[in-house]
Amino acid sequence: MCGIVGLHLRDATLYPRLGELLTGMLDQMCDRGPDSAGMAVYGDPVWSPPGHTTVSVLDSPLPAAELAALLSTATGAPIAAHDLDPTLVLHGPVAHEPLVAAVRAAVPAARVIGFGSELTVLKGVGNPTELAHRFGLPAAQGWQGVAHTRMATESAVTAEGSHPFSVGPGQCLVHNGSFSNHMSIRHELRRAGVEFDSENDTEVGARFVAQQLAAGADLEKALLLLNGVFDGFYTLLVSTADSFAVVRDAISCKPAIVAETDRWVAMASEYRALAELPGVADARIFEPEPEEVYVWRRPQ
């Protein structure tokens, strides 16, 4: 079944409340996905300080301090670490390519689950609200966040299999539904040199979108292409370093609702996740149309 929530803030005075608001939204979706959960936050000054790249890592065999010391030596930059078990959040004043490469060399058995200049990804198994509080999500700040509660259907209940899937710099995808032709698309992407970290069908969608963005498509075009290639029932929320987008399949049996005000844009699987947002009584509220791509962009 799964539950999706996302919040894109237009009003900078709300940035200190991002984590608080996102946690409240996530809490309302626990019964849609009690297995595991994941969250992505854009712009938190503790997890992703200005001028730093942040890399989120699952299942590191090394403790946070030891891994940070190894990465500092490997990159020649001071790398800091936050232990948010089972996720380690690493950041430093270095580009993402050398930091990701250094992580993979130092702990090849671990999984990189997110990277970017403002993006922090957190994943875990268990009650979503309890995970959010354990990670410290209510205190997080920033301009955009997405979260997902998972009821596993296509793969095992693991932190690695939870959403969001973040496979490109600053990119995240969360998904309610299933892709019926994901295996054939996985084979095509593998032939094109794309590597996968899991057997999850959602990762196939995320890899496809990342491939399109890397080839020069904007987010709207990438999701229109996804609509033309993927079969199944799906509602997707996709975020990047400057955008927030929603798309549904042609039948649109998987629920989605959007609320928009001058201060924020929010999306959730059900209205109850939006009901406590500030000013929601005056929001424009609508259900996304089938196969239409909705994109909101951060002001420059």
Image: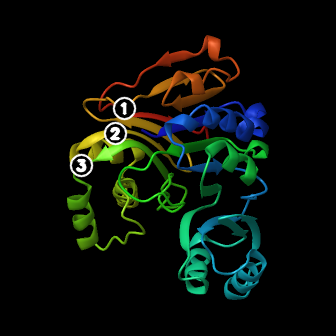
Q: Are marks 2 and 1 in contact (CB under 8 Å)?
A: yes
Where is residue 195 shown, x and y percent of the image? 36, 72
Pinpoint residue 184: horizontal percent, then vertical percent. Answer: 20, 60
Q: Position of residue 116 (x, y in %)?
A: 59, 61
Q: Sort mark 2 into few (<14), some (14-19) or many (20+) by Cα contacts within 10 Å.
A: many
| Residue denoted by label 2 | 234
Q: Quadrant of the N terminus?
A: top left
Q: Secondary structure at mark 1?
A: loop
* Residue kind at label 1, given as amino acid type: Lys
The amino acid marked with disc number 2 is Tyr
Q: Which mark is residue 254?
A: 1
Question: Where is the C terminus found, in terms of image quarters?
Answer: top right
Crowd around label 1: few <14 · some 14–19 · many ≥20 (10 Å): some
Residue 9 seen in the current view = no
Identify residue type, mark 3: Ser
Residue 269 position (above or below residue 193): above
Q: In terms of sequence position, does the residue under pointer 2 or pointer 3 come before the other?
A: 3
In this view, the residue farthest toward the top is 282
Query: Circle 3 sits on which residue?
Result: 180
Marked residue nearer the N-terminal end (3 or 1)? 3
Q: Residue at x 56, y 46 (%)?
A: 242
Nearer the N terminus, badge 2 or badge 1? 2
